Amino acid sequence: MSQQVMDQPILMSDNLTNDAGVTLSWRKSLPFIFAISGSLLLAAGRINFGGERFISDGACMILALASYLIAAVFYLTNLYAPFRFAEQLGLWATTLGVFFNLSSWLLRWIAAYDRELQIFNSQGANPADMPWVFRYIPFANLYDLSLAFAFGAGVTTLLVIRRRQFRIIAALSLPLAAIILVLARFIGNELIDLPPVLDSYWRPIHVGIASLSYGIALVCFAVAVLYLLKDGVKVEKMVIWTSAFAIATFATVAKFSIFSPFSFGTYTASVFTGSSRASLALRADIPYVGWLIVLTAALLIASTLSYVSYLYKNNEKAKGWGHKLLWAAMIVQAIGVGTLVYQLKNIQSVESLINPAQYTTFARWMLQQQGIPQQQIDAMPATQLTQIAGRWVAENGPLLHLSLNANPVELSALITAFAGTFFVLLFMIDTDKLRNALPAADKLDSLMYKLGGVTFAGLALLLITGAVWANESWGRYWGWDAKEVGALVAWLTYAGFLHSRIGYSWKGRRSAYFAIAAFLFVVFTYLGVSYLLPGLHSYA
């Protein structure tokens, strides 16, 4: 009897501990619950009470972008000047970001349905004959995918930072999610109709899995970078890699001509006419931007050489020069991006910025659009083609204009290169304090492994559902299309990440390098096809 009495407090204590643990876990999940349930309630309000005066999906996207950036600022501030209130503000700003991000996507789904209903009504068709609402899930183009990609990164971050020790991860993952939303902003949120061959219920399944997997991969990438920092990798080495990435971006992004011998220092942008969103086969030379990019590349190269001298010769003077040159490169990059955005929005006389050397190619393109037989076009002399194009440009000059939507990938690439330079400079500020504030290396390594494993599974499902959809739409499971190959390479890289860890006990830096390389393949799959490579997936 006495033994039972002695045991009773122990049992009661265990129950209290378990109850407290459940309560604490539930409280940690409140931000996630608020973000998801709030989005669903907002969508329900749009269905029942909405209309033209209801908040738009585009406005929600901008609010999500602002929330992600504000959250990142609070977390960065808390890192260098610890302040519990700033940390809490960062958490709730992240929650708002996920809420607005998902709300934007849901409202877009409703808008797509309303648009189709309006078409049915205008044609006198019976609304009851409209396809199931599942068909209107917004996964028709790169804008839709970008919204879902950013949401995947945001919600993964929100789940990870339930543990306070991992909240610093948001300072890196959320700016990357914000860049994806910036890209979406530049692309434009017009609703489009897919070709009938792609109208399948496999579309939202396949693209939904892709976007969420990409988001998890982004957070895995952020954890990998922070692990390398925690593990003692010198920030100067990171500078070498971020500078190489920036220079490669400048040199290889579609339609950049700044390093070409024939147009060195020239940055060009697509030209539009009237209210059309389709660009012409003309590019306007944007003043100053090309030379600012060339100067940035030169500064990054000089900075890299200085840091190489420091790393391999222990040259402290070279380190100081590298630091100064890197700061200069970041400032020039910021000026370049600002100059580009300002001029795309304000240049009026586009005609004067078009190089006449393009006229022959433009005339061929224009005649093809008019249905002139190719044989007849080929028979025309170059002088005649130049005259046709020159006359057209002169007559339509007042209608020609530029747009921020013209170069979405190029502009986002410039912003990403700037972000890379910014973060390595940030890491140089009191690096030891930053390393001490990060979670333990083994905790980061474990989280990176878990996120990489989930990404691997998600990409496997992506390939499977994509193959089924491809067979339904095109009559074959696999066709070695550019995006198919990119997705396969990304999946195989994550497979290598897991295999090397399980089979050969690779952990730490090796796994982090694998995770970073794998995410770069994911980014190429996400963007590389739609804007850089031709293929069946270019419809996006």
Image (spheres, rainbow, N blue to C red):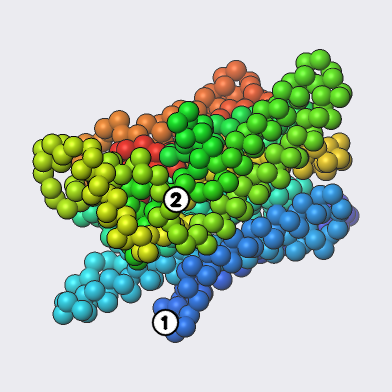
Q: Residue at x 41, y 35 (%)?
A: 487
Q: Is residue 24 left or right of residue 499?
A: right
Height in image: 338 above or below 487? below
Q: Amino acid at mark 2?
A: Leu
Q: Amino acid at mark 1?
A: Gly
Q: Residue at x 36, y 44 (%)?
A: 356
Height in image: 60 above or below 373? below
Q: Are marks 2 and 1 in contact (CB under 8 Å)?
A: no
Q: From the top left corner, tell me how far across and down residue 31 is, in percent.
A: 65, 63
Which mark is drawn over residue 389? none
Q: Is residue 128 left or right of residue 406?
A: left
Dot 1, crowdedness within 10 Å: few (<14), some or many (≥20)?
Answer: few
Q: Is residue 158 left or right of residue 249?
A: right
Picture mark count: 2
- In the picture of the structure, the residue carrying the numbered disc 2 is 353
* Front position among marks 2 and 1: 2
Q: From the top left corner, tell me how far across and down residue 461 is, in percent.
A: 40, 41
Q: Secondary structure at mark 1?
A: loop
- In the picture of the structure, the residue carrying the numbered disc 1 is 51
Q: Residue at x 80, y 54 (%)?
A: 77
Quadrant where the N terminus sits is: bottom right
Q: Nearer the viewer, residue 412 or 57?
A: 412
Q: Earlier in the sequence, mark 2 or mark 1?
A: 1
Dot 2, crowdedness within 10 Å: few (<14), some or many (≥20)?
Answer: some
Height in image: 210 above or below 46? above
Q: Nearer the viewer, residue 203 or 165?
A: 203
Height in image: 124 above or below 62? below
Q: Residue at x 83, y 41 (%)?
A: 429
Q: Nearer the viewer, residue 346 or 457?
A: 346
Residue 198 appears in the picture as rendered: no
Residue 114 appears in the picture as rendered: yes
